[in-house]
Structures are given as structure tokens and as C-alpha cells.
Amino acid sequence: MPKLWDATIDAHRNAVREAVLDATAGLAAAHGVASVTMSQIAEAAGIGRATLYKYFPDVESILRAWHERQVGAHLHQLQAVREQAGDPGRALVTVLETYARICQAQHGGDVAAMLHQGPHMAHAHQHLQTLVAQLLADGVRTGDVRDDVPAPELAGFCLNALRAAASLTSKAALSRLVAVTLAGLRPPA
Amino acid sequence: MPKLWDATIDAHRNAVREAVLDATAGLAAAHGVASVTMSQIAEAAGIGRATLYKYFPDVESILRAWHERQVGAHLHQLQAVREQAGDPGRALVTVLETYARICQAQHGGDVAAMLHQGPHMAHAHQHLQTLVAQLLADGVRTGDVRDDVPAPELAGFCLNALRAAASLTSKAALSRLVAVTLAGLRPPA
């Protein structure tokens, strides 16, 4: 087989895989992640059920792959927001606001708990923890962040505090949560 | 059957049930909650395996009953601490410190995620959220707590923030987490 053919096959496989994950995301958003079935996913992705089973053995494995892609996209978004912010103080605020918005959009329940147990989540949390700890260390240098608590501990504090966004329904409440969290980070008077 | 006999039977059943949960707690503490088996529990509780199966169908149901008892004990402890504290400002600090210590002692993993999905947890969280929101509303009246954010939102902030204690290993780090959380609650300068 020529290499070009292998590349074509790979590209096709990736395109089908992405279509399956997009279809799953659409169904999960419309009807809730717990109700999604293999038949619905195949139909929404425009492939046969038999083809779908060549890619994924069950709904759980699709949900895991979809969740992994979601988590990766969120990390990417947080890094982009950080780079666009320019000065360190602004970067900390926008990264925390963006993380709070991501948490607000999350849904709980059994499926979420199952997905959050994957090894990709431990890796993503570590990544996020490091990103925020670096921003906080920058903030300590500029005097915007308290220096009496190690930056990794402050990062754990903010990331947990902002998860309270999951039960908030308004933008105003989200802004208040970010403000209260930032107040905890400021140097004591 | 006389009523006295029924009462004796009930007391015996409760005693066996408690012994099973105590045995499970001991095994979970010694070897981790994920490795506990029905045989180990029966042996540690001093009953036969057949008797154990008359009380609980599987390890999961025992772990759920044990976890429910644990969560109830933690709520009881938090309420006791609140009542002993006397003045409202002191009550808020000691309740938050106690909750942080409870979170620090928790273990994560698949089993913990499974146990935390039970309806008793939703109920316990609601209870805890109400307890802390009341303490915060008291704090607003005495001027110790900021009045620009509704007390239930502040309660969600503290309880999430203090869950960061789960990854802290020292008492000093725990005190720092409580201090940072309290700083977020204070009236803005």
C-alpha cells in the first residue's frame, strides 16, 4: 500500500471519530448525558450502528473520549485566555473568571462523577493547578497576591472555591464568586 | 409474640448492623475502602457470612450504609461545635475549621465518588449549606462578614474552598486554607 493511502485512511478514521464525538456532544447537550444510546449516536453521526461499534465498544467509551476532548478544549481555552491577557494581574482575573464559567456550565450526576474519575482528569487538574499556581506566583511578585501562603495552596483554594459556580445560575452571582475568591488571595491589610 | 420480644429482636438486629458497619469502618481505614470483602467484614464483625447476607446483599450496600452513618456523624459534630462556640464569630471560625479537618481526612478514588452520589449526600450538603449560611447571616449582622453577597452564595464559596483540604497534608496548611477562606468572607476594605 502506498503511504498516501494510509494517510487517507487515517484522515477518514479521524473524521468519523470526530463526527461521533460531535454527535454525542449534541445529544448530551439536548437530552442529558445519561440518556444517550449507541443507536442515537450512529444516526446523529450519519453512520451505521455496525460501523460505530468498529470505533467504540459502548456508550461509556464514547462518553470518556468525548469528555477527554472537552477537558482538553477547556485547558486550551484557559491557556489562550492567559496569553491574550497581557499583564499578570489581568491574566489571573480572566483565567479565574473563565474557569468559573466552565464550572457553571457543568452538569452533575452519576455520569459526570464517572467521567471525572478518568486518568485524563487527574492529568488535567495537575495542568490547571500548575497554570494557576504560576499566575499566583507572578501576582506575589507584583504585590497583587498574598505572600504568606504557598502559591500551590492558593491555587487549590481558588480552583475549589470556583467550583461553587456549578450551582450558580446567574452571571451576577458568578462575578460575585470570582470577587470573593480574589478577596481571599489579596495581601492581608 | 409479646412486644418485649419484638423490642429484643430489634435491639439485636441494630447491634449486629452497627457491628457490621464498625467492622467495615475498621477494614476501610486499615486497607482502603476499595479492597473490603464480605468475608472480611463477616469475620471482623464476629458473624457468619450467611448471617451477613441476611443484613446486606453486597459490599456496596454496606459501604453506603457506613458512609451514611459517617456523614450523619460529621453533621452532628459540626452542629455540636457550633453550639459549644458561644458567640457567632467564633462559631463560624470553628465550624469552618472542623469542616476543613473532615475534608482533610477524606480519601478520594472511585469508591468515594460512588458513595458521594447517594441521595443522603445531597441531603447532608443541603443541611450543611443551611447551617453555614445561617452562621454567615449572623456574621453579616455583627459586621464580621461582607453584606454585598447573599449568605447562601458565600456558604457555597466556603464549603467548596475548604474541600481543597483533601489534598493538604499538614495542620499548618489547613490553618492557612481556613485563613484565606475567611479573608474572602470579610467586608471589603
Image (cartoon, coloured by chain):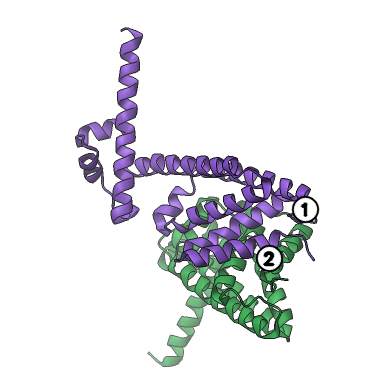
Chain colours: A purple, B green
Dot 1: chain letter: A
Q: Report the Cα–Cα distance between label 2 and label 1.
A: 19 Å
Residue A149: x, y in percent? 77, 55
- Type of amino acid at the residue the image marks with label 1: Gly
- Type of amino acid at the residue the image marks with label 2: Thr
Q: Secondary structure at mark 1?
A: loop
Q: Residue at x 23, y 39 (%)?
A: A42
Residue B175: x, y in percent? 76, 63
Q: Residue at x 65, y 65 (%)?
A: B102
Q: Between residue B121 and residue B41, name the one nearer to us.
A: B121
Residue under pointer 1: A143
Residue A152: x, y in percent? 70, 49
For residue A69, above or below residue B26 = above
Q: Residue at x 67, y 46 (%)?
A: A88
Q: Between residue A42 and residue B43, name the one nearer to us.
A: A42
Q: Is the residue under label 1 in contact with that under label 2 (CB below 8 Å)?
A: no
Dot 2: chain letter: B
Whether residue B64 sits left or right of residue A62 in the image: it is right
Residue under pointer 2: B181
Whether residue A114 sits left or right of residue A127 in the image: it is left
Q: Quadrant of the N terminus of chain B?
A: bottom left
